[in-house]
Amino acid sequence: MVDRPVTAGETYVVAIEELGDEGDGVGYVDEFAVLVDGASLGETVQVEITDVGSNFAQADVLGDEFGFD
């Protein structure tokens, strides 16, 4: 059984480390993939988990990029 470290409705700050097949940003929470629609590679964003599947979660961006200009 896959451990799911996230729950729908929770918020996290994730670094977008790669892009998914459909262009979604992909970040990780405790090595669990989080797909973030509208996030770009290299961004660090605050997200809200919207759906949790067996091997990945989906999330929406809540906050802009964190970091330096």
Image: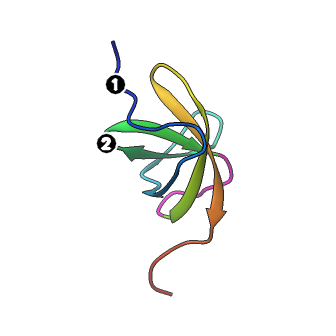
Q: Is residue 28 above or below residue 55?
A: below
Check disc 1 and report its element: helix, strand or loop.
loop
Q: Is residue 12 left or right of residue 48?
A: left
Q: Position of residue 22 (x, y in %)?
A: 65, 35
Does the residue at mark 1 contact the one at mark 2 (Cβ under 8 Å)? yes
Q: Which residue is mark 2?
A: 30
Query: Is residue 46 or residue 20 the one in the foreground?
Result: 46
Q: Position of residue 4 (x, y in %)?
A: 40, 29
Instruction: Identify the mark at residue 3; answer none if there is no mark.
Output: 1
The residue drawn where x is 45% and y is 56% is 14
Residue drawn at point x = 53 percent, y = 63 percent? 45
Asked if residue 6 is among those painted magenta in the image, a careful observer would answer: no
Where residue 13 appears, as percent x and y from the top left, is 46, 60
Please tell me which of labels 1 and 2 falls first in the chain: 1
Residue range of the region highlighted in magenta in the rendering: 37-42
Colour scheme shown: rainbow
What's the magenta bit mostly, secondary-structure-wise? Answer: loop
Amino acid of disc 2: Asp
